[in-house]
Image (cartoon, rainbow, N blue to C red):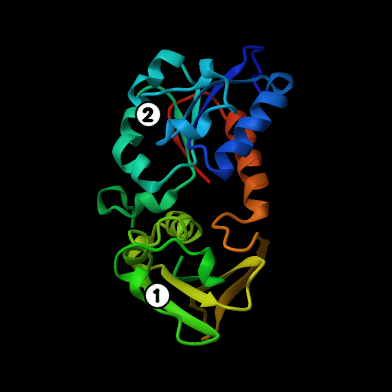
Amino acid sequence: MASDGVPRKVGVVGYGRLGQSLVSHLLTQGPELGLELVFVWNRDPGRMAGSVPPSLQLQNLAALRERHPDLVVEVAHPQIIQKSGAQILRYANLLVGSPSALADQATEQRLQSLRVTMATHPDGFRLEGPLAAVLSTGHRTVLYEGPVRGLCPFAPRNSNTMAAAALAAPSLGFDRVVGVLVADLSLTDRHVVDVELSGPPGPTGRSFAVHTHRENPAEPGAVTGSATVTAFWRSLLGCCQLPSRPGIHLC
């Protein structure tokens, strides 16, 4: 990945399923790809015991500059980006795995109509605040439908695809991209995401429209789909091919 022959130094923030997979790939495949894992940080350091070499365990995220990373990959929680994103960017490029963190109005930028629907089994949700109290009333229940900005704080682990869509459509942003969260009792082994995009009416009065349907296999009750793990590894490799300059990378 490093065109100048110097290994690209990578730090991983978060050691859940995605973090564990990225760390494993970096340790086993990184050297041949010109990538060097320089630290792993997790909110619960004990989770790294026995699987992450002690020399790579970063106990204090504020000390990341001492590891001289070129790229930091966040796969922890939106709060990490909100609290520490600016600090990380002082010392490294940042690949954001929790773009719902950027629903914060201070980070917003202002396509036409964009609607993202995520459906999965209720056990696959990790909801907070008022959404945590919403009960499924039947086989398929709409838990939320409205601006993505209003969803992200209460479903931070289940709204990242919607947040990425809001960032990809700056003329709409978090307030005008519609997010829909659906609990579906039949979806025990997958997450389903539908993206509906339509443009402005043309001379005939009809609009250009695109509808994509994605099914991501997932273990029962899992927040992270199986294909997401591979996608993050590919995103990391893609980031390491970019010119080395300060910047945020969204995944």
Q: Is residue 156 above or below residue 238?
A: below
Residue located 58% across and 44% down the image: 17
Between 48 and 96, the residue placed more toward the observer is 48
Label 1 and label 2: CA atoms lie apart by: 33 Å
Q: Residue 57: image x %, image y %?
A: 49, 22
Q: Residue 1: image x %, image y %?
A: 67, 24
Q: Quadrant of residue 37?
A: top right
User: How busy is the neighbourhood of tag 1: few (under 14 within 10 Å), some, or many (20 plus)?
Assistant: some
Residue located 50% across and 35% down the image: 47
Q: Earlier in the sequence, mark 1 or mark 2?
A: 2
Between 29 and 111, the residue placed more toward the observer is 29
Let me know if residue 212 appears in the view.
yes
Q: Residue 5: image x %, image y %?
A: 67, 12
In the image, taking residue 85 as reference, residue 237 lies left or right, namely right
Residue located 53% across and 83% down the image: 140
Foreground mark, 1 or 2?
1
The disc label shown at residue 144, or none: 1
Residue located 46% across and 15% down the image: 68
Q: Amino acid at mark 2?
A: Ile
Let me know if residue 196 appears in the view.
no
In the image, taking residue 58 as reference, residue 123 lies left or right, namely right
Q: Residue 75: image x %, image y %?
A: 49, 41
Indicate the secondary structure of the residue bearing disc 1.
Answer: strand
Name the residue tied to disc 2: 88
Q: Amino acid at mark 1?
A: Tyr
